[in-house]
């Protein structure tokens, strides 16, 4: 497992595949003999998040159990750059290799290109969906805004890999390899790139599943907790002197309500009619602008009308 104090150059020497991750994090080469932490700090990348992704993609090490330390903006930068690299460079590059290695007049060659185009379209559609739906949603969470019509669980349930087309494609290429040396070498090199990028895509998907999604779940929980806290605070502070506007009987009704009594039980307890209880409840809602049992419970506790031990939860 790599640590912040390790030299960045040593990490690359051990695992040259990290070069691709560096680009996705926006880390430029030319950093000399600096440590991972020094390079990340200088180039505006969260060190913990960088190492969480790198250690996971290299050897599956899960050093990211502390999801609170993960930087969602850094993960967003990584995912966006990964999409751009794959869609704008890798997919077109491999197609170009296939065109150069295949005989365009051969029916099987045309089938290979057709299968590749279908595979590329599936990957492109999947990533474009993330860019259209998931990324704006996460940016909204970072701005403190939740979308009631979408959440990370919705994305997680539909997050799967498209791999059956590429498996068929690889099988056909292996069986099709031409006998002449040049074409054979070209197609072998292309096949190697397809295998390599299939592995990269698998790692990309695992980073989303194992690192990104848990981080967004935590962000959602924090936002919901903050929203509840804000609403409670706002409700309490809207009219801090509101207890003065309540009659003693209305306070008695509130106490009975938060203790879990029904209208009939309150009427029997206070020796009043059920209609009178209903009238008191209407007046309480109008004066306090609180319309739920939970809201009245919080109000009663904050204003010392009841002890929390007597509240029916």
Image (cartoon, rainbow, N blue to C red):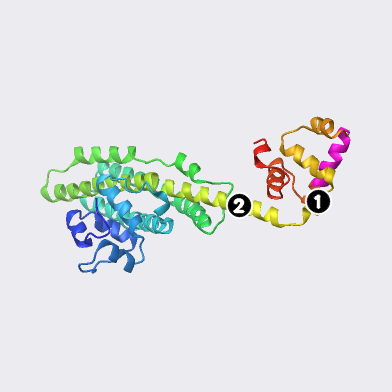
Residue at left 28%, top 50%? Answer: 55
Q: Is residue 60 above or below residue 70?
A: above
How would you rate the neighbour count of disc 2 (Cα within 10 Å): few for under 14, some for 14-19, many for 20 or more? few
- Which structural element holds mark 1? helix
What mark, if any, has residue 184 been given in the picture? none
Q: Look at 35% across and 44% down and name the residue there.
A: 206
Secondary structure found at label 2: helix
Residue designated by label 1? 287
The answer to which image quadrant residue 297 occupies is: top right
Towards the viewer: 152 or 35 = 35
| CA separation in Å, label 2 and label 1 | 22 Å
Which residue is farthest left?
181
Residue 181: x and y in percent read 11, 48
Q: Quadrant of the C terminus?
A: top right
As drawn, is 243 to the left or to the right of 161? right
User: Within the image, what quadrant is residue 3 found in?
Assistant: bottom left
In the depicted view, which residue is nearer to us: 175 or 131?
131
Tally the marks.
2
Of the pair 64 and 267, the residue shown nearer to us: 267
Q: Position of residue 187 (x, y in %)?
A: 19, 48
Asked if residue 311 shows in the view, the reply is no
Q: Is residue 75 highlighted in magenta?
A: no
Reply above or below: 256 against 61.
Answer: above
Q: Is residue 282 magenta?
A: yes
Q: Which residues are magenta?
A: 273-284
Residue 16 left/right relative to 47: left
Q: Which residue in the structure is indicated by mark 2?
A: 229
Q: Which of these two is toward me, 134 or 107?
A: 134
* Position of residue 218 in the picture relative to residue 312 (left or right): left
């Amino acid at each position: 497992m790599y640590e912040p104090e390790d030299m960045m150059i040593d990490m690359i020497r051990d695992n040259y595949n990290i070069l691709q991750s560096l680009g996705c994090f926006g880390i430029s080469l030319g950093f000399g003999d600096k440590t991972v932490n020094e390079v990340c700090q200088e180039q505006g990348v969260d060190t913990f998040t960088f190492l969480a992704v790198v250690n996971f993609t290299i050897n599956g090490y899960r050093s990211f159990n502390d999801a609170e330390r993960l930087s969602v903006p850094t993960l967003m930068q990584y995912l966006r750059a990964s999409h751009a690299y794959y869609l704008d460079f890798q997919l077109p590059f491999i197609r170009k290799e296939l065109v150069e290695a295949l005989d365009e007049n051969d029916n099987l060659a045309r089938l290979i290109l057709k299968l590749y185009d279908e595979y590329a379209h599936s990957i492109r559609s999947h990533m474009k969906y993330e860019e259209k739906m998931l990324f704006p949603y996460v940016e909204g969470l970072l701005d403190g805004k939740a979308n009631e019509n979408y959440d990370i669980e919705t994305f997680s349930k539909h997050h799967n890999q498209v791999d059956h087309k590429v498996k068929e494609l690889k099988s056909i290429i292996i069986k099709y390899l031409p006998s002449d040396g040049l074409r054979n070498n070209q197609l072998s090199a292309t096949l190697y790139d397809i295998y390599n990028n299939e592995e990269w895509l698998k790692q990309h998907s695992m980073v989303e599943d194992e690192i990104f999604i848990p981080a967004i779940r935590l962000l959602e929980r924090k936002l919901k907790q903050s929203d509840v806290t804000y609403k409670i605070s706002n409700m309490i502070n809207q009219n801090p002197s509101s207890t003065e506007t309540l009659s003693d009987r209305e306070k008695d009704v509130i106490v009975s309500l938060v203790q879990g009594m029904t209208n009939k039980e309150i009427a029997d307890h206070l020796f009043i009619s059920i209609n009178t209880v209903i009238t008191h409840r209407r007046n309480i809602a109008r004066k306090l602008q609180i319309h739920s049992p939970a809201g009245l419970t919080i109000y009663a506790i904050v204003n010392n009308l009841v002890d929390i031990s007597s509240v029916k939860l």
